[in-house]
Amino acid sequence: MRASVEEAGALLARTDSAGRRRRRSSSPVRTASPRPGSLRRHSSSFREDVGHAASETYLVSRLTFTLLQYLGLGYRWMAQLLSLTIYAILLMPGFLQVGYYYFFSSQVRRSVVYGDQPRNRLDLYIPEDNSRPCPVMAFVTGGAWIIGYKAWGALLGRRLAERGIIVACIDYRNFPQGTIGDMVHDASQGISFVCNNIASYGGDPNQIYLMGQSAGAHIAACALMEQAVKESGGHPVSWSVTQIKAYFGLSGGQTFVDVLQQAGAQARLLLYEGKTHTDIFLQDPLRGGRDPLVEDVLSIIHADDAIARQKIALAPTPKRLVYEWQLKLARQISPF
Protein backbone atom coordinates (compact mmCIF):
# COMPACT_ATOMS: atom_id res chain seq x y z
CA MET A 1 0.00 0.00 0.00
CA ARG A 2 1.48 3.33 -1.03
CA ALA A 3 0.02 6.76 -0.41
CA SER A 4 1.04 10.28 -1.34
CA VAL A 5 2.01 11.87 1.96
CA GLU A 6 1.37 15.38 0.70
CA GLU A 7 -2.25 14.50 0.01
CA ALA A 8 -2.51 12.71 3.34
CA GLY A 9 -1.31 15.92 4.94
CA ALA A 10 -3.92 17.89 3.01
CA LEU A 11 -6.61 15.48 4.24
CA LEU A 12 -5.67 16.10 7.86
CA ALA A 13 -5.46 19.83 7.28
CA ARG A 14 -9.06 19.87 6.07
CA THR A 15 -10.24 18.01 9.14
CA ASP A 16 -8.26 20.13 11.59
CA SER A 17 -10.45 21.83 14.16
CA ALA A 18 -9.28 25.26 13.08
CA GLY A 19 -9.99 24.46 9.43
CA ARG A 20 -6.66 25.88 8.35
CA ARG A 21 -4.87 24.56 5.31
CA ARG A 22 -1.36 24.97 4.10
CA ARG A 23 0.44 23.59 1.07
CA ARG A 24 4.15 22.96 1.11
CA SER A 25 4.78 22.39 -0.98
CA SER A 26 39.53 -4.13 -5.67
CA SER A 27 42.63 -3.01 -5.42
CA PRO A 28 45.33 -5.27 -3.93
CA VAL A 29 45.80 -4.83 -0.22
CA ARG A 30 49.34 -4.40 1.11
CA THR A 31 50.00 -6.23 4.35
CA ALA A 32 51.79 -4.20 7.02
CA SER A 33 52.99 -4.91 10.50
CA PRO A 34 50.44 -3.99 13.13
CA ARG A 35 51.00 -0.70 14.87
CA PRO A 36 51.57 -0.66 18.63
CA GLY A 37 48.28 -0.92 20.42
CA SER A 38 46.32 -2.10 17.35
CA LEU A 39 45.91 -5.60 18.73
CA ARG A 40 44.63 -4.14 21.97
CA ARG A 41 42.09 -2.00 20.13
CA HIS A 42 41.00 -5.03 18.08
CA SER A 43 40.56 -7.07 21.27
CA SER A 44 38.61 -4.24 22.86
CA SER A 45 36.37 -3.99 19.79
CA PHE A 46 35.73 -7.74 19.93
CA ARG A 47 34.81 -7.51 23.61
CA GLU A 48 32.43 -4.68 22.81
CA ASP A 49 30.79 -6.77 20.08
CA VAL A 50 30.40 -9.72 22.45
CA GLY A 51 28.96 -7.45 25.14
CA HIS A 52 26.56 -5.90 22.66
CA ALA A 53 25.47 -9.35 21.46
CA ALA A 54 24.84 -10.39 25.06
CA SER A 55 22.70 -7.32 25.77
CA GLU A 56 20.75 -7.81 22.55
CA THR A 57 20.17 -11.49 23.42
CA TYR A 58 18.89 -10.50 26.85
CA LEU A 59 16.44 -8.02 25.33
CA VAL A 60 15.17 -10.53 22.76
CA SER A 61 14.71 -13.12 25.54
CA ARG A 62 12.77 -10.63 27.64
CA LEU A 63 10.54 -9.76 24.69
CA THR A 64 9.92 -13.48 24.12
CA PHE A 65 8.77 -13.95 27.71
CA THR A 66 6.54 -10.89 27.34
CA LEU A 67 4.97 -12.50 24.29
CA LEU A 68 4.43 -15.75 26.18
CA GLN A 69 2.73 -13.89 29.01
CA TYR A 70 0.50 -12.18 26.49
CA LEU A 71 -0.50 -15.52 24.98
CA GLY A 72 -2.07 -16.54 28.30
CA LEU A 73 -1.97 -19.65 30.47
CA GLY A 74 -3.26 -23.21 30.21
CA TYR A 75 -3.64 -25.38 27.10
CA ARG A 76 -3.67 -22.42 24.71
CA TRP A 77 -0.41 -21.12 26.19
CA MET A 78 1.28 -24.50 25.90
CA ALA A 79 0.07 -24.97 22.32
CA GLN A 80 1.30 -21.52 21.29
CA LEU A 81 4.62 -22.06 23.06
CA LEU A 82 5.11 -25.36 21.26
CA SER A 83 4.23 -23.78 17.92
CA LEU A 84 6.60 -20.88 18.51
CA THR A 85 9.43 -23.23 19.53
CA ILE A 86 9.05 -25.49 16.49
CA TYR A 87 8.66 -22.47 14.24
CA ALA A 88 11.95 -21.00 15.52
CA ILE A 89 13.79 -24.36 15.24
CA LEU A 90 12.68 -24.85 11.64
CA LEU A 91 13.90 -21.40 10.59
CA MET A 92 16.97 -21.36 12.87
CA PRO A 93 19.52 -21.99 10.06
CA GLY A 94 18.35 -18.81 8.38
CA PHE A 95 18.14 -16.86 11.61
CA LEU A 96 21.73 -17.79 12.50
CA GLN A 97 23.02 -16.53 9.16
CA VAL A 98 21.10 -13.29 9.50
CA GLY A 99 22.28 -12.96 13.11
CA TYR A 100 25.92 -13.28 12.04
CA TYR A 101 25.36 -10.62 9.39
CA TYR A 102 23.63 -8.36 11.90
CA PHE A 103 26.37 -8.53 14.55
CA PHE A 104 29.53 -8.75 12.43
CA SER A 105 28.88 -7.14 9.04
CA SER A 106 30.67 -3.85 8.46
CA GLN A 107 27.59 -2.73 6.52
CA VAL A 108 25.44 -2.64 9.66
CA ARG A 109 25.57 0.29 12.09
CA ARG A 110 23.81 -0.98 15.20
CA SER A 111 22.05 1.04 17.88
CA VAL A 112 22.57 4.56 16.57
CA VAL A 113 21.10 6.90 19.19
CA TYR A 114 18.31 9.18 18.00
CA GLY A 115 16.66 10.28 21.29
CA ASP A 116 16.78 10.33 25.09
CA GLN A 117 14.77 7.19 25.86
CA PRO A 118 16.59 3.84 26.34
CA ARG A 119 14.82 2.37 23.29
CA ASN A 120 15.55 5.40 21.12
CA ARG A 121 17.98 3.52 18.89
CA LEU A 122 18.02 2.57 15.22
CA ASP A 123 20.03 0.19 13.02
CA LEU A 124 21.41 1.30 9.67
CA TYR A 125 21.99 -1.10 6.77
CA ILE A 126 24.44 0.51 4.34
CA PRO A 127 24.95 -0.71 0.74
CA GLU A 128 28.48 -1.78 -0.16
CA ASP A 129 28.44 0.57 -3.13
CA ASN A 130 27.69 4.00 -1.74
CA SER A 131 29.82 5.95 -4.19
CA ARG A 132 26.83 8.21 -4.71
CA PRO A 133 23.96 9.18 -2.37
CA CYS A 134 21.59 6.24 -1.85
CA PRO A 135 17.80 6.21 -1.47
CA VAL A 136 16.69 5.70 2.13
CA MET A 137 13.96 3.56 3.73
CA ALA A 138 12.95 4.35 7.31
CA PHE A 139 11.39 1.11 8.61
CA VAL A 140 9.25 0.64 11.73
CA THR A 141 8.99 -3.05 12.62
CA GLY A 142 5.91 -4.81 13.96
CA GLY A 143 5.38 -6.77 17.15
CA ALA A 144 1.76 -6.40 18.34
CA TRP A 145 2.78 -3.17 20.15
CA ILE A 146 4.41 -5.34 22.87
CA ILE A 147 7.45 -7.05 21.28
CA GLY A 148 8.49 -4.66 18.53
CA TYR A 149 12.27 -4.53 18.06
CA LYS A 150 14.58 -3.01 15.47
CA ALA A 151 16.44 -6.29 14.75
CA TRP A 152 13.22 -7.80 13.37
CA GLY A 153 13.97 -5.77 10.24
CA ALA A 154 17.38 -7.37 9.64
CA LEU A 155 16.21 -9.57 6.76
CA LEU A 156 14.45 -6.81 4.88
CA GLY A 157 17.25 -4.39 5.68
CA ARG A 158 19.81 -6.77 4.22
CA ARG A 159 17.79 -7.41 1.07
CA LEU A 160 17.19 -3.74 0.34
CA ALA A 161 20.79 -2.77 1.16
CA GLU A 162 21.95 -5.38 -1.36
CA ARG A 163 19.89 -3.44 -3.89
CA GLY A 164 21.43 -0.05 -3.15
CA ILE A 165 19.04 1.29 -0.50
CA ILE A 166 20.00 2.46 2.98
CA VAL A 167 17.57 1.05 5.55
CA ALA A 168 17.04 2.60 8.98
CA CYS A 169 15.20 0.22 11.33
CA ILE A 170 13.73 2.33 14.12
CA ASP A 171 13.29 0.92 17.63
CA TYR A 172 10.61 2.28 19.95
CA ARG A 173 9.10 1.77 23.38
CA ASN A 174 6.62 -1.11 23.71
CA PHE A 175 3.65 -1.57 26.01
CA PRO A 176 3.81 -1.42 29.02
CA GLN A 177 6.96 0.69 28.66
CA GLY A 178 4.88 3.27 26.90
CA THR A 179 1.51 4.09 25.38
CA ILE A 180 0.63 4.23 21.69
CA GLY A 181 1.34 7.94 21.88
CA ASP A 182 4.84 7.22 23.18
CA MET A 183 5.46 4.74 20.37
CA VAL A 184 4.33 7.29 17.79
CA HIS A 185 6.52 9.95 19.40
CA ASP A 186 9.55 7.63 19.30
CA ALA A 187 8.95 6.73 15.66
CA SER A 188 8.58 10.41 14.77
CA GLN A 189 11.88 11.19 16.49
CA GLY A 190 13.53 8.36 14.57
CA ILE A 191 12.16 9.66 11.28
CA SER A 192 13.39 13.13 12.18
CA PHE A 193 16.90 11.76 12.79
CA VAL A 194 16.86 10.06 9.41
CA CYS A 195 15.66 13.18 7.62
CA ASN A 196 18.26 15.41 9.25
CA ASN A 197 21.30 13.12 9.50
CA ILE A 198 21.15 10.43 6.83
CA ALA A 199 23.37 12.40 4.45
CA SER A 200 26.33 11.80 6.78
CA TYR A 201 25.83 8.04 6.27
CA GLY A 202 25.71 8.30 2.47
CA GLY A 203 21.96 8.67 2.12
CA ASP A 204 20.10 11.00 -0.20
CA PRO A 205 17.91 13.35 1.91
CA ASN A 206 15.77 13.97 -1.16
CA GLN A 207 14.88 10.28 -1.49
CA ILE A 208 13.49 9.21 1.88
CA TYR A 209 10.69 6.65 2.10
CA LEU A 210 8.74 5.39 5.12
CA MET A 211 7.66 1.77 5.70
CA GLY A 212 5.98 -0.07 8.57
CA GLN A 213 4.87 -3.66 9.06
CA SER A 214 1.84 -4.76 11.09
CA ALA A 215 1.84 -2.73 14.34
CA GLY A 216 4.77 -0.81 12.90
CA ALA A 217 2.63 0.17 9.90
CA HIS A 218 0.06 1.60 12.30
CA ILE A 219 2.69 3.49 14.31
CA ALA A 220 4.41 4.86 11.19
CA ALA A 221 1.10 5.99 9.69
CA CYS A 222 0.13 7.70 12.95
CA ALA A 223 3.49 9.48 13.06
CA LEU A 224 2.97 10.67 9.50
CA MET A 225 -0.56 11.88 10.16
CA GLU A 226 0.35 13.55 13.44
CA GLN A 227 3.15 15.40 11.68
CA ALA A 228 0.75 16.60 8.99
CA VAL A 229 -1.59 17.95 11.66
CA LYS A 230 1.26 19.82 13.34
CA GLU A 231 2.34 21.36 10.06
CA SER A 232 -1.19 22.38 9.11
CA GLY A 233 -1.53 24.10 12.48
CA GLY A 234 1.67 26.04 12.05
CA HIS A 235 3.46 24.29 14.92
CA PRO A 236 7.27 24.05 14.88
CA VAL A 237 8.49 20.72 13.48
CA SER A 238 11.85 18.99 13.10
CA TRP A 239 10.90 17.18 9.91
CA SER A 240 8.23 17.58 7.27
CA VAL A 241 5.85 15.17 5.56
CA THR A 242 7.07 16.67 2.28
CA GLN A 243 10.44 15.02 2.95
CA ILE A 244 8.83 11.56 2.68
CA LYS A 245 8.40 10.53 -0.95
CA ALA A 246 6.04 7.61 -0.25
CA TYR A 247 4.67 5.49 2.59
CA PHE A 248 4.48 1.68 2.47
CA GLY A 249 2.16 -0.07 4.94
CA LEU A 250 2.67 -3.85 5.12
CA SER A 251 0.39 -6.51 6.59
CA GLY A 252 -2.85 -4.83 7.45
CA GLY A 253 -3.56 -1.67 5.36
CA GLN A 254 -6.63 -2.73 3.35
CA THR A 255 -9.13 -0.45 5.14
CA PHE A 256 -6.65 2.41 5.35
CA VAL A 257 -6.33 2.49 1.56
CA ASP A 258 -10.11 2.79 1.17
CA VAL A 259 -10.25 5.80 3.49
CA LEU A 260 -7.38 7.54 1.73
CA GLN A 261 -8.89 6.95 -1.69
CA GLN A 262 -12.27 8.24 -0.55
CA ALA A 263 -10.54 11.41 0.59
CA GLY A 264 -8.91 11.82 -2.82
CA ALA A 265 -5.42 10.71 -1.87
CA GLN A 266 -3.19 8.70 -4.20
CA ALA A 267 -3.14 5.26 -2.60
CA ARG A 268 -2.72 1.79 -4.07
CA LEU A 269 -3.51 -1.60 -2.54
CA LEU A 270 -1.37 -4.62 -3.48
CA LEU A 271 -2.53 -8.06 -2.37
CA TYR A 272 -0.06 -10.94 -2.53
CA GLU A 273 -2.11 -14.07 -3.10
CA GLY A 274 -1.46 -16.90 -0.66
CA LYS A 275 0.81 -14.85 1.61
CA THR A 276 0.51 -14.87 5.39
CA HIS A 277 0.98 -11.98 7.81
CA THR A 278 4.77 -12.46 7.96
CA ASP A 279 5.58 -14.04 4.58
CA ILE A 280 6.47 -10.88 2.71
CA PHE A 281 9.17 -9.68 5.08
CA LEU A 282 10.30 -12.91 6.77
CA GLN A 283 9.69 -16.20 4.95
CA ASP A 284 10.11 -14.82 1.43
CA PRO A 285 13.57 -13.29 2.09
CA LEU A 286 14.60 -16.58 3.74
CA ARG A 287 13.51 -18.41 0.58
CA GLY A 288 15.98 -16.48 -1.55
CA GLY A 289 15.51 -15.50 -5.16
CA ARG A 290 13.53 -12.44 -6.10
CA ASP A 291 10.46 -11.93 -3.92
CA PRO A 292 7.47 -9.81 -4.97
CA LEU A 293 7.57 -7.26 -2.14
CA VAL A 294 11.18 -6.25 -2.69
CA GLU A 295 10.64 -6.09 -6.44
CA ASP A 296 7.59 -3.84 -6.03
CA VAL A 297 9.40 -1.55 -3.61
CA LEU A 298 12.40 -1.30 -5.94
CA SER A 299 10.17 -0.50 -8.91
CA ILE A 300 8.87 2.55 -7.05
CA ILE A 301 12.11 3.78 -5.51
CA HIS A 302 14.19 3.33 -8.68
CA ALA A 303 11.45 4.33 -11.12
CA ASP A 304 13.48 7.30 -12.40
CA ASP A 305 16.96 5.82 -11.96
CA ALA A 306 18.01 3.81 -15.02
CA ILE A 307 21.52 3.21 -13.64
CA ALA A 308 20.16 1.67 -10.43
CA ARG A 309 17.72 -0.51 -12.36
CA GLN A 310 20.56 -1.78 -14.56
CA LYS A 311 22.67 -2.64 -11.49
CA ILE A 312 19.75 -4.52 -9.94
CA ALA A 313 19.17 -6.48 -13.14
CA LEU A 314 22.83 -7.56 -13.17
CA ALA A 315 23.04 -8.25 -9.44
CA PRO A 316 23.32 -11.88 -8.27
CA THR A 317 20.14 -13.55 -7.10
CA PRO A 318 19.86 -13.60 -3.29
CA LYS A 319 20.73 -17.03 -1.96
CA ARG A 320 18.35 -19.35 -0.14
CA LEU A 321 18.82 -19.41 3.64
CA VAL A 322 16.49 -22.33 4.50
CA TYR A 323 15.01 -25.24 2.58
CA GLU A 324 11.52 -25.05 1.12
CA TRP A 325 10.19 -27.89 3.29
CA GLN A 326 11.23 -25.93 6.37
CA LEU A 327 9.37 -22.87 5.18
CA LYS A 328 6.23 -24.82 4.34
CA LEU A 329 6.16 -26.59 7.68
CA ALA A 330 6.92 -23.39 9.60
CA ARG A 331 4.08 -21.68 7.80
CA GLN A 332 1.61 -24.37 8.82
CA ILE A 333 2.42 -24.08 12.50
CA SER A 334 3.19 -20.36 12.66
CA PRO A 335 1.67 -18.69 15.76
CA PHE A 336 1.58 -15.33 13.96
Image (spheres, rainbow, N blue to C red):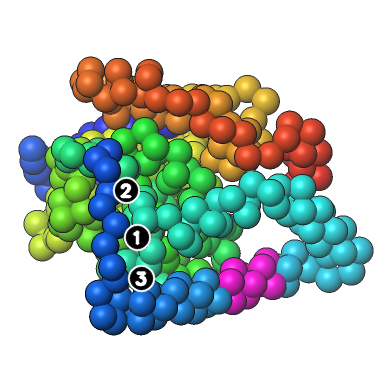
Amino acid type at mark 2: Ile
Residue pictured at 77% horizontal, 47% vertical: 90
Please name the amino acid that badge 1 sits on: Arg
**Residue 192, quarter of the rendered image:** bottom left
Q: Are marks 2 and 1 in contact (CB under 8 Å)?
A: yes
Q: Which residues are magenta?
A: 56-67
Q: How far apart are the alpha carbons under marks 2 and 3?
A: 20 Å
Magenta-colored segment: predominant secondary structure: helix
Q: Residue at x 10, y 63 (%)?
A: 236
Q: Which one is in front, 183 or 320?
A: 320
Residue in the picture at 18% in, 39% down: 131
Q: Look at the numbered disc 3 and give the secondary structure of its residue.
A: loop
Q: Which residue is mark 2?
A: 126
According to the image, label 3 marks what residue? Answer: 120
Residue 215 shows up from this direction: no
Label 3 and label 1: CA atoms lie apart by 14 Å
Disc number placed over residue 109 in the picture, else none: 1
